[in-house]
Each structure stands twice: as structure tokens, then as C-alpha cells.
Image: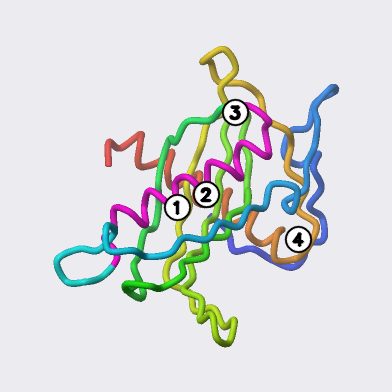
Amino acid sequence: MENITDDMIQNLSPWNDGIKPGDTTKTVKESACEQAYQVSPRYLNAAGRLFGGDLLSWIDLTGALAAKRHCNMPVSTVAIDNIHFAKPLHLGDIAILISNVTHVGNSTMEVRVNSYVEDLATGHRSLVNTAYLVYVALKDEKPSRVPRLIPETDIEKREWFAGEKRNEIRKSRRKEGI
């Protein structure tokens, strides 16, 4: 895998991702989603913090919404990558989850979900978690081609190239049975 260069970013176009006649396209911002959740007693673990499984559920729901917005059809979760809990959430905290499509294959979409805790008094958000998930688009319960992704900003383009690398890693893991 090669490093992402500024040259790669400048030359990125939707045609580099296998665009075909009749394909539709969407931008990253067209799929963006923001969800808010309040940590209530039912979500607490024995240590008094948000149970990680509940945060994973919220991440999956928010990620699936971005994927559905991108492809306009039902989706199914294929993979969840890179889960790291950087900061705990406590009773009464407001969790803000922001998701967007970062990369697409033929029928799959990679979605990044950032989770934050928001201070309601100041509006300041602190990053709690970043996760990458992969969804497959389903039409009549069969994988279906998704719109090509158009990254517009340098950040979106860097994320697209990083998504290429993550996809290569996922394929390698599957091949090796890891």
C-alpha cells in the first residue's frame, strides 16, 4: 500500500473508481447523518458508564442511515472496524454521532462514524470514538450496485484513499482467515 500524496488527491475523479454508463453519483455530504442520544440509567454498565454494546448499536444505526441515504435501498452490516473507546460516557451525557460514506465498492459502502460527548452549556464536543463500518446494499435481498461516491474536499479525498487501504486490509484478512 502506498502513501496518500497530494498528487493523488488532485487527480482523483469519480471515473477512477470504475464509473460506468448509467451509474449515478452522490457526494459525501448527501449521505451525512447526525444523531443524538442521551445516556439514561438503562444504558449504564456496572461501573456507571455507558455500556459499550449500546454505543456499538448506536454507531451501527447511525452508520446504516448514512449508507441508506447513499444508496436509497435497504442495507446490511458486513463489517465493523477499528473500535476504540477513547473516553467514557456517563449518566446524563449527550452522545452525538456523525456518519458519512467514505468509500464505495460495487455493492458496498464504507461509513465513518464519529461519536462525541457534547457539553450542553457550551456546545463543545469531545471525540469519544471513531469507527468504520461496511454495509452492503440489498435490492430484493441481493447485493446491488451503489452510486459512485464523489469526494469534494481534500479531507474527503484523503478519506477515500484511506478507505481503499482499509478495503485492501479487509480483503487480506478474509483471505488469510483472520
Give the residue number, with chain letter if any, for mark 4: 9
Q: Is residue 98 left or right of residue 11?
A: left
Q: Are marks 3 and 1 in contact (CB under 8 Å)?
A: no
Secondary structure under the numbered disc 1 in the rendered image: helix
Disc 2/disc 3 C-alpha distance (Å): 19 Å
| Label 4: how many Cα within 10 Å (few below 14, some 14–19, many 20+) | some
Q: Residue furthest bottom?
A: 122
Could you tell me which residue is drawn at 81 percent across and 39 percent down? 15
Q: Nearer the viewer, mark 3 or mark 4?
A: 3
- The answer to whether residue 147 is above or below residue 132 is above
Q: Which mark is residue 62?
A: 2
Secondary structure under the numbered disc 2 in the rendered image: helix
| Label 1: how many Cα within 10 Å (few below 14, some 14–19, many 20+) | many
Disc 3/disc 4 C-alpha distance (Å): 24 Å
The residue segment tinted magenta is 50-73
Secondary structure under the numbered disc 4 in the rendered image: helix
In magenta segment, residue 56: yes
Could you tell me which residue is drawn at 27 percent across and 42 percent down? 178
Give the residue number, with chain letter if any, for mark 1: 59
Disc 2/disc 4 C-alpha distance (Å): 28 Å
Disc 4/disc 1 C-alpha distance (Å): 28 Å
Q: Earlier in the sequence, mark 3 or mark 1?
A: 1
Secondary structure under the numbered disc 3 in the rendered image: loop
Q: Nearer the viewer, mark 2 or mark 3?
A: 2
Q: Position of residue 55 (x, y in %)?
A: 37, 57
Q: Position of residue 94 (x, y in %)?
A: 46, 70
Disc 3 residue type (three-letter)? Ser
Q: Which mark is residue 73?
A: none
